[in-house]
Image: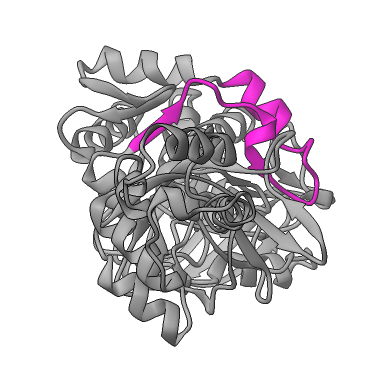
Amino acid sequence: MTYDVVIIGAGAAGLMCALTAGYAGRRVLVLDHANKAGKKILMSGGGRCNFTNLATGPANFFSANPRFCISALKRYRPEHFVELVERHGLEYVEKAPGQLFCAHSAKELLDVLLTECEWAGVELRLKTSVERISPQGEGMRLVTSVGRIEAGAVVVATGGLSIPTLGATGFGYDIARQFGLRVTETRPALVPFTLTSQWKGRAAALAGVACDVAVSVLRNGQRLGPGRDRQYCEPMLFTHRGLSGPGMLQISSYWQPGDELAINLLPGVDIPGALAEARRATPRRQLSTWFAERLSRRLAQALAEWHGEDPTLAELSNGHIDVWAERLGEWRIKPAGTEGWRTAEVTLGGVATDAISSRDFSVEGLPQLRFIGEVLDVTGELGGYNFQWAWASGVACGQAV
């Protein structure tokens, strides 16, 4: 069996690379050990797949080399992918500014990619394992469960370690190490936090309660997070295990064991000023009632219980107002950890980009070997950025391979 290009991994990046190379006239084979292509596409976004973000830019990505992603993202932009799905009549919705989801089902998006691969003449082999890869002259030789395959180039699009139940493995990192490439430390990202016993019980009692927060990481006296304010302003969700929701998933990319979270439960509110004004206007009101006008009633009652007091507003001194302003505006909590690879949406870290071309994703000194997508040390924020990286890196590689 001989092909111009063999792509290992039938996920977002692999399929995008395959159809692009196929349309360029290459004979393309996609291999995957799973029994179905695009499993992560199907489960993402609650089964509706947040397939891109119109505001995608380099600042939305984590990498030891933050400039690496610039070239591919500039050449294949969100509007290019939108044009592709529109040609297939796929309906989509903008659930949050810039975040595009399938209107009905992620299966429709996967069908678009598989249809394009079919039209481009791509061959797809599932339930096929790769046992060995070695250079063969200017090409590559693969030993697989279906026999020996000769390839002009091999593209590794195996993804990261997140959600092993979908078949995620470290195989791509093993290939990188085999050929002398460095792999940066990998850890779960876009993942919920778990809490210690006392706080776990408190969170479990509030399971299902959500509120808008502003959250940062605190490490050695430094505040870590995005932008000038070093914080994400997104919803938080209490769970039976700890804290989740977009705000927590986002900040998990900054968090390391031992760090604290600083959570503002009333972002955008001048808490001391608002409490002082409420004390003047409605002095007989309970503090928990004031909370309940801004937070859920369950959370409002829990805040009073956690701190063992629920005074009337008239009973609040100026100093007491400052205490409550800190409790609400700078709730500090040290997570026990995260839920790990089981629920992490992506992998932080991966194949180091210092020996990878940002133009065509080839390995320095071994151009017949390439790496794309999540297997690389490029990780996006929550909100469609990781899929846009998959499309962009897949296209850039597919055009050049």
Q: Is residue 157 left or right of residue 282?
A: right
Residue at 59% across, 73% down:
334
Asked whether the viewer can see residue 111, the reply is yes
- Of residues 346 and 128, the one nearer the viewer is 346
- Of residues 201 and 311, the one nearer the viewer is 311
Q: Is residue 94 left or right of residue 396?
A: left
Residue 317 x/y as whole percent: 57, 53
Quarter placement of the N terminus: bottom left
Q: Is residue 182 left or right of residue 381?
A: right
Residue 349 x/y as whole percent: 67, 59
Residue at 68% across, 76% down:
258
Quarter placement of the C terminus: top right
Residue 99 position (above or below residue 79): below
Residue 241 x/y as whole percent: 35, 75
Asked whether the viewer can see residue 151, the reply is no
Residue 154 x/y as whole percent: 58, 51
Residue at 68% across, 41% down:
226
Farthest residue to the bottom: give it. 197
* Residue 102, quarter of the rendered image: top left
* Residue 281, quarter of the rendered image: top left
Residue 397 position (above or below residue 184): above
Q: Is residue 312 left or right of residue 298?
A: right
Magenta-drawn stretch contains 399: no
**Range drawn in magenta:** 50-76
- Of residues 334 and 309, the one nearer the viewer is 309
Magenta-drawn stretch contains 74: yes
